[in-house]
Amino acid sequence: MISNHETRLYLAAHPVAYPLVRLLARLGPVVRVPGLGVVVNDAAVARAVLTDDRFRKDGPGSPGDLWTPVLGPSVLLNMEGEAHLALRRKLAPLFAPASVDPLVRDVLNEPLADLSRRLADGETVDLVDSMRLMAGAVIGRLIGLEEVGEKAARELFADGERVVSMVSLRSRRLADRQVAVARAVLDRIGDIASAAYHRGGETTVMGRMRSLGLSEAEARGAAGAFFLTGTETVATFVPRLVALLHDHGTSEFDLDTAIDEAMRFTTPTPVMLRSVAAPGRVGRVQVRPGDRVVIVTHNCARAYGPFDPARKHPAEVRHLWFGAGPHFCIGYPLAQAEIRAVAEVVLRHRPRIVARRAARRVLIPTYAQLWIAHAR
Ligand code: HEM
């Protein structure tokens, strides 16, 4: 039942690719697939690749190929080495729980009170729609908007979706037309970030970037990267978490353990890419410069069995869905704070699912609608 719903989400998102990806898992921990790359289906091997600097994010076939034309050359997710480390060191404090917890509380306080009131009043609520609004509001504040009303939050979310939807599991580069559309969206994000950067001050992320000595271009680039990576990932996950817990039927669980397990089972970013910079081995497969490594996080994570909200994860797979090594998700504390804040409120209502519909042909599998109501 549980797996069926999640499988349906993956099949609705990737009707052709998903069955093939799952088939690859049966071929072994590492397998070379002509035209695709060296595919990794094993958590320990994935971790070894992610923590080895011969496997990079700025070479041919890496995410850099996809995003550099849109975001510029220096936005963490397409950087390596000293420059990457230096920028991470500067940005990391901005994402520490002490920074992001108050931001999330402040932005979500009202929307969550409203959501809770509606559920308590017996209303049926589309959690997908609510989550888009809340994720849009959080990212709006992060990139520098002082006030993020409902309209602005929805527009931000839709803008992000428009850019992310240009990418498929097979994309290696964006077409010129797509780059132009994405740049127009990211210019708007950059302008919001620039304005906040110039206002300065210690209370906004962009203001703090300025006092940390980041250039305006770096702050604009970082805002674009946060916007693209930190909106849909969180928004799509929460309805899946709530649905998984509902379908599992348990009401006794530790929320943090359940969130980790739902992350493992859903893997919101199902794949990570690397470009090989020096000869070596991935598992037993010999690789050479220019090869592409496709870490199928989804296969690595699914090897550990069905969804069980009490499951503790062994070291090799722990948090792999947020990456590992130098590129480990910098937004992890923000994602956790946001997910926990919403889940705590929604799950208090012990929601029942009234109706659900899978989203079709999207990059991150999810519900198009998840209508929930307070338990009777
Ligand atoms: C459910 C939520 C999220 C998931 C599953 C997720 C997943 C990931 C993964 C797997 C990576 C590493 C990719 C790789 O090594 O190739 C990553 C990196 C990154 N994430 Fe997240 N992420 C989430 C939320 C966020 C949020 C909320 C933000 C910020 C607002 C964010 C910003 C970033 C950035 C900037 C990087 C690049 C870091 C670097 O290359 O040094 N993410 N994320």
Image (tube, rainbow, N blue to C red):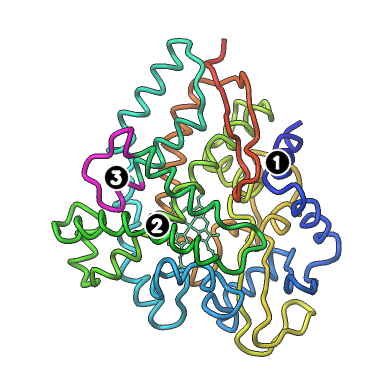
- Residue 136, quarter of the rendered image: top left
Q: Horizontal placement of 139 versus 211: left or right?
A: right
Mark 1 Cα shell of 10 Å, populated few (<14), some (14-19), many (≥20)? many
The mark lying in front, picked from 3 and 1, is 1
The residue that mark 1 highlights is: 12
Q: Is residue 362 above or below residue 327?
A: above
Q: In which quarter of the image is the C terminus?
A: top right
Q: In this view, does 372 lie above or below 155?
A: above
- Considering every residue shown, the one lying at the far bottom of the view is 279
Residue type indicated by callout 1: Ala
> Where residue 26 sits: x, y (%)?
85, 60
Q: How far apart are marks 3 and 1 (CA)?
A: 34 Å
Residue type indicated by callout 2: Phe
Q: How far apart are marks 1 and 2 (CA)?
A: 27 Å
Within 8 Å: ligand 1 and the Cβ of disc 2?
yes
Residue occupying the point 57% across, 29% down: 369
Secondary structure, mark 1, is helix
The answer to whether residue 97 is magenta is no
Secondary structure, mark 3, is helix
The residue that mark 2 highlights is: 226
Mark 3 Cα shell of 10 Å, populated few (<14), some (14-19), many (≥20)? many
> Where residue 24 sits: x, y (%)?
81, 61
The residue that mark 3 highlights is: 103
> Where residue 280 sits: x, y (%)?
69, 87
Q: How far apart are marks 3 and 2 (CA)?
A: 15 Å
